Structure formats: structure tokens, C-alpha cells
């Protein structure tokens, strides 16, 4: 599984950003408000409610070109982490209890809490895999299985294929992206340029505000979905894109505060009131 344990990357130059990019995207239907965590569905309209996977993908997608960086080898596992957190926030999955010996987050297994369909094909596919797997597996194992990054040939059946393309297709259906064909010398590639810039800019603005004007200096007072977007966007190596438009001063403040979040100990944070164990276990899998 790809990991970003080295923290935030340095601010990239615009020139470098414009090179090195790759295709991204497509998913299927999505959404269901039942059993969602606090402000899970805080978007303006039904049509633009996005999953964590879709929000992270949008942060990584080049607006005009319609694909993600060719050099980004982190986004695949990052999106699988988003899936587990989304299912946790929707009360479909949970982490087994720590027990008397206080087992670590990464040693605790994922348990099925409810097999009620979410309405999102990718989420339901992952949910079905967890439901059918005995004995239960850990968060880190599931990120590897869903990514296809396991050495166990018997677990390859759990791989979620073409996740970025399926997510992008879903965003096309929601009117956020469109579909085009581009010729790259030896082959044609399907791309998904941005058509609704308002939706993406809303995500970017919320990410920026959460670490600037609305910074609360306490992860447990932050909206769980926004905290997850920040942490998983970092793990997917796309958080830089949300901060690129900031002034140098704001950029430094934003990066400093994100570093504070990354430096938190998930084992300590998951013991605090109203913490979501699944969320902190996924964070631990990427920051250990």
C-alpha cells in the first residue's frame, strides 16, 4: 500500500504541476442520507452531494485536461481509505472494540454493522466484500485488498477495479465533469474535464477555510468529513492542489496546521469522546 509517512511535500511550482499528469476517473451512483455522520450531507442540492472519494478525486483532477497526475502513486490507496471512512460514517462498518488490553487501531478488525445498501455502487461493492469475509480483517489489510496491492492471490478477488474511472463517470452523471477523448501519440484516452467549477471551488474553499479562518485547533471540533478530506487528500498527494491558490503567508499557515493534524496520535485521539474509531484507524494506516 502506498504511504505518505514523510509528511507534506514542498510547494510545487506551477510549471512542474503542468507536466506529469495522468488520467483519472469514473464511478456510479451515490448517496444516501440514512445513518450518515453529523454534517455528512451538507451540500446545497441532492445532485451535488459528493462522497469522500469524489471530493478527493476532484482535488487531484486537472480541470481542463480531465485526468490526475501520471506520477501520483498514492491516490489509489487513498481513495480506498476514503471508502472505509465513508462506510464508517454511514454506520455500515465499525472497528471491533479495543478490549481490556487496548489493542492498537491497526490490530483491530473491521466488523459489519449494517449491510443496508448505501445507493453507491463502489461503497456497496466494498461492503459486500467485508460482509463475506471471515475471519474479519484489519483496516490496513482492507486498503491493500481493495487496492489489489496484496501478495495473497486468494484476496485479489476483493480488488475494486477502475475506481477513478468509475468515480469520474459518477461525477459526469452529477454534471460536475464531462467526457472527452484525447489522443496521446500511441493511444486514445478517455478524459473527464471539469464542467461545474462551482462544485470543485466549494470543496477547495472549505478545505482552505477549515485550516485558516475556521481553524479550531481541535480535531474533535472539526466536521468529521472535512477532517477526513484533509487527511486523505494528503495521503493521496492532492492536498497541495487546494492550497496552491493561497498567498505565501496563508499557505505557510495552512501547511503548519495540516502538519499539526498529521502529527496527532490516532491511538490517543480515538479514545476521546465521540471519536470515530474507523476514521482514526484509517488515518493511522497512512501515517504510521
Image: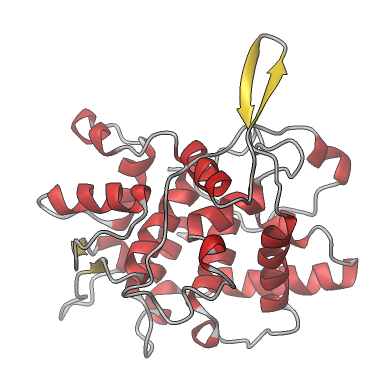
In the rendered view, would you say 220 is above or below 112?
A: below
Q: Of residues 13 and 177, which is closer to you in this image?
A: 177
Q: Is there any visible trace of residue 237 in the rendered image? A: no
Res 34 quadrant in image: bottom left
Name of the residue lying farthest toward the left = 134
Q: Residue at x 33, y 57 (%)?
A: 119
Res 162 quadrant in image: top left
- Tell whether 68 sits left or right of 133: right
- Tell whether 107 sits left or right of 13: left
In the rendering, at what x and y percent does residue 148 appear?
35, 35
In the rendered view, would you say 136 is above or below 114?
A: above
In the rendering, at what x and y percent does residue 101 appear?
18, 77
Where's the N terminus, which quadrant? top left
In the rendering, at what x and y percent does residue 110 appear?
23, 61
Q: Is there any visible trace of residue 131 in the rendered image? A: yes
Where's the C terminus, which quadrant? bottom left
In the rendered view, would you say 243 is above or below 80?
A: below
Q: Of residues 252 and 216, which is closer to you in this image?
A: 216
- Tell whether 270 sits left or right of 138: right
Q: Residue at x 31, y 60 (%)?
A: 118
Res 20 quadrant in image: top right
Q: Residue at x 56, y 62 (%)?
A: 48
Amino acid at each position: 500500500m502506498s504511504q505518505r509517512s514523510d509528511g507534506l511535500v514542498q510547494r510545487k511550482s506551477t510549471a512542474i504541476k503542468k507536466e506529469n499528469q495522468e488520467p483519472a476517473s469514473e464511478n456510479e451512483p451515490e448517496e444516501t442520507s440514512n445513518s450518515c455522520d453529523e454534517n455528512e450531507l451538507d451540500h446545497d442540492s441532492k445532485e451535488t452531494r459528493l462522497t469522500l472519494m469524489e471530493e478527493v478525486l476532484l482535488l487531484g483532477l486537472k480541470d481542463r485536461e480531465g485526468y490526475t497526475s501520471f506520477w501520483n502513486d498514492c491516490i489509489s490507496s487513498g481513495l480506498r481509505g476514503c471508502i472505509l471512512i465513508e462506510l464508517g460514517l454511514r454506520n455500515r462498518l465499525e472497528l471491533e472494540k479495543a478490549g481490556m488490553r487496548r489493542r492498537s487501531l491497526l490490530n483491530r478488525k473491521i466488523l459489519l454493522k449494517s449491510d443496508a445498501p448505501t445507493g453507491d455502487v463502489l461503497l456497496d461493492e466494498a461492503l459486500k466484500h467485508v460482509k463475506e469475509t471471515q475471519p474479519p480483517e484489519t483496516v490496513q489489510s482492507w486498503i491493500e485488498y481493495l487496492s489489489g496491492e496484496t501478495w495473497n492471490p486468494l484476496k485479489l478477488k476483493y480488488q475494486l477495479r477502475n475506481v477513478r474511472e468509475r468515480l469520474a463517470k459518477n461525477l459526469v452523471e452529477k454534471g460536475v465533469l464531462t467526457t472527452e477523448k484525447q489522443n496521446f501519440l500511441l493511444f486514445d484516452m478517455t478524459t473527464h474535464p471539469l464542467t461545474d467549477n462551482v462544485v470543485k471551488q466549494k470543496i477547495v474553499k472549505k478545505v482552505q477555510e477549515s485550516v485558516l479562518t475556521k481553524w479550531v485547533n481541535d480535531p474533535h471540533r472539526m466536521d468529521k468529513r472535512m477532517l477526513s478530506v484533509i487527511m486523505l487528500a494528503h495521503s493521496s498527494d492532492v492536498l497541495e492542489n487546494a492550497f496552491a491558490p493561497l498567498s505565501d503567508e496563508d499557505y505557510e499557515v495552512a501547511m503548519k496546521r495540516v502538519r499539526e493534524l498529521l502529527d496527532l496520535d490516532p491511538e490517543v485521539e480515538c479514545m476521546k469522546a465521540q471519536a470515530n474509531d474507523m476514521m482514526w484507524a484509517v488515518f493511522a494506516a497512512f501515517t504510521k
